[in-house]
Amino acid sequence: MYSKYCELRDERGMNDLQVARETGIPQSTLYDWGQREKEKPGAKMGVDKLAKIARFFSVTVDYFLSEPK
């Protein structure tokens, strides 16, 4: 899930701070998500926050929940 977020973020030339400002999700939450992913691949983000990220990047929540590419 986090890797898909990173792909979208990087494709748009953004960083976590910029995404945080645009979505209202704290940068620390995005950072923590990445750290959890390292410890436990497939770490989930809360549905409400994931929905905000999906809307921001114009993808569906299912995009994040589907199997990695």
Image (spheres, rainbow, N blue to C red):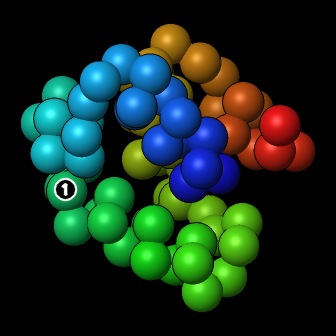
Q: Is residue 57 above or below residue 63?
A: above
Q: Name, please, the residue furthest toward the top.
A: 58
Q: Is residue 22 above or below residue 27?
A: above
Q: Residue at x 65, y 33 (%)?
A: 61
Tell whether 19 sits left or right of 50.
left
* Front-lying residue, 7 or 40: 7
The picture places residue 50, in percent across and down from the top left corner, at: 50, 44
Q: Is residue 24 visible?
A: no
Task: Name the foreground residue: 45 vs 40.
Answer: 40
Residue at image x 51%, y 58%?
A: 46
User: Seen in the image, is 17 located left or right of residue 25?
Assistant: left
* Circle 1 SS class: loop
Above or below: residue 55 compared with residue 69: above
Q: Residues within 10 Å of mark 1 (few under 14, many from 20)?
A: some
Image position, residue 17 (x, y; %)? 15, 45
In the image, residue 50 sits, relative to residue 63, either above or below, namely below
- Image x and y of residue 7, in percent: 53, 35
Quadrant placement of the C terminus: top right
Relative side of 46 to 64, left or right: left
Tell me residue 63's x, y (percent): 72, 30
Residue ID at (42%, 47%): 49
Instruction: Report if residue 30 is visible in the image.
Output: yes
Report which residue position mark 1 lands on: 26
Three-letter residue code for mark 1:
Pro
Q: In the rendered view, does 51 fall on the left or right side of 43? A: left
Q: Quadrant of residue 27?
A: bottom left
Q: Residue at x 58, y 72 (%)?
A: 37
